[in-house]
Amino acid sequence: MDSDTFVINSEGVISLRSDATLDRETVDNYILQVVAVDQPVNGLSSTAQVIITVQDVNDNNPQFLPLPEPIEIQEGAYTPSSPGEVCEISATDADIGDNGRVTISTSSHSEIFRFREDGTLLAIEELDRETQDVYDVIIVAMDHGIPQRNNITTVRVRITDVNDNAPVFSSDTYSKSILVKDAKVGDVMLTLSATDKDAGSNALISYSFFEDSSMVALNAETGVITLTSDLSEVTEDTLLTLTAIATDHGTPPESDEVAHVFVNGMTMRDERGWATSKEEWFILTVEAIDSRTPPNTAETTVSVQVENVNEAPVFDAEMYKAEISSISPYKFPIVKVQASDPDVDESSELQYSLLESTTLLDVEASTGQVYVLDASRFGDNPSTFQVKATDKHGLFATTTVQIEVKQSVHRDSVSVISLNRPVYIVEKMITEMEDSMGKVLGWTVKILSVRAEDGNELRTILRESTDKTYVSFIATDSSGAVIQATEVKEKLNSENKVLTSELEKVFGPGLVIKVEDSSGDSGESSQAVTIALGVLVPVISVTLVSAIIYFVKKKGTDSDRQSSDPDIDLPERRCSIDHLANFNTKRLKRNDFDRESENGSDISGNSISAL
């Protein structure tokens, strides 16, 4: 038998060569010719054919086929029984049998999207583009081998617009009062304003009047109402009432309920003046009738202005629910909260923030976009956070954001390094850092979180600033499988010099990289506390001794002074350890103590307070 893969001994046992490997995906069977002879020279022989079949082992991850681009679906009221088809996504596996049978499922937004057996991604809940126009859906391809192998990717589903919103006027009523004698052709009376939540041509608006008017004209595009007459023929107070409509350019077009326009032409000036068009006005015609027969009557026009009172913002929902993966990258968008302000033209000035700060997530102040800072540190149970929207006058409303984290990988797969650079610099270089680390490690690197060194309270006491930042990340191979943290750590240590050199191209020279054993809760903080206290205790002791000596000397003088004036109470003052720490940086002389005393500071009080 002549083979590079197998050998046979004199007893007829066929075995694998020590330097040979079997890969079913490369060669799945071998055909060998075996010859048996009864004696080495001039012996009789017989030949047999041996077929060796290589059995499959689940050693390949599923692979996604190229994804369609773009992935879009129209907004609509979809249900599980009447779903909307988004796109077809396929994955293959080089293994066979159950090892090669692949099932695709969603790992985020599972309540909105799911897969059909043929790999078609379906929308099973209502999609409203005006509420959310983009969904980043994490999908998982899982084979049925033992143990199972998987691959993860993210698809961005964009929601396209349907003309399902009518334009809305900013006010139900627009009014303007003018003095007839000052009227000129072309004067701007009012500007109508309407908005449409739709997008594109569905949001373009045209304005028109139901009635024709010889006094005013309405610009269909801008909503500006101008005078077309100088009103020279008007000899008495006149109230012009018109009805306006806003229509969008969608198919079919949508129109708002009408807005009423009042133009009050006055022949005499009202000394009280008139408010701006942003205030709400009611124009009333009042008639007076006497008791004579026939009765005499008189009419007049009354304008009533309703002044605006500041009201708190209102959120569109009391609770927003979202679902993310535990390997969601740093600043991955989670959900967008939205609030409106009942006050005129102030919704765009709302500021969003978290009611209580956290290292897990944050919110964009101007847009209400909530994004993750560290998905790997969420617990297994849903987490709730309070987001508030504040108007420019300080009134605010709150809503609840509930986030559930799907554990896509075990926490042991998360690796942590620390850099001697501030957080605000590191977080600006996320992409460059991922590329540089991937280049050195030979894997794809995804950064999950960027956070400052622990020990904030210590740094406050010592008036120190830290340049140490912890970076949590995962690494995946070319097939998408997550590399265990132990293997990543070994490679980080072995390639430390190369990695440092590569990252210095991003952060500059003098970079120090340390591979951390945990999520950044290293022993350095406790060591720093020990060192800090070791420095502070001698300082406090010296200060206390100096203060007692000075206090003894000073006491006689103070006692004399107090005895001469019993109405004088010497003030007792204390200061924090922050104040005391300043003794590290300067040496107090006798006249310094005198100056402290003149300023009303009791040195002994400081020392006792610090102790």
Image (spheres, rainbow, N blue to C red):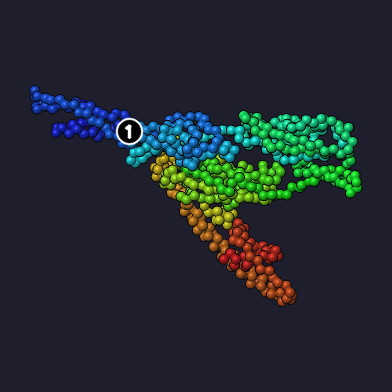
- Taking the image as shown, residue 465 lies to the left or right of residue 138, namely right
Residue corresponding to mark 1? 96
How would you rate the neighbour count of disc 1 (Cα within 10 Å): few for under 14, some for 14-19, many for 20 or more?
A: some
Specify the farthest residue to the front: 293
Percent position of residue 124, x then y: 49, 38
Q: Quadrant of the N terminus?
A: top left
Residue for point 75% across, 30% down: 219
Looking at the image, which is closer to me, 466 or 147? 147
Residue for point 69% across, 75% down: 559
Can you tell which quarter of the image residue 37 is in? top left
Can you tell which quarter of the image residue 177 is in? top right
Residue for point 51% across, 57% down: 529
Residue 376 in view: yes
Percent position of residue 69, x then y: 50, 29
Residue 504 in view: no
Percent position of residue 415, x then y: 44, 45
Residue for point 49% across, 47% down: 404
Q: Give, as a three-letter code, the residue at label 1.
A: Ile
Q: Quadrant of the C terminus?
A: bottom right
Percent position of residue 508, x then y: 54, 39
Q: Is residue 152 above or below residue 312?
A: above
Judging from the image, what secondary structure is the residue with disc 1 in? loop
Looking at the image, which is closer to me, 327 or 596? 327
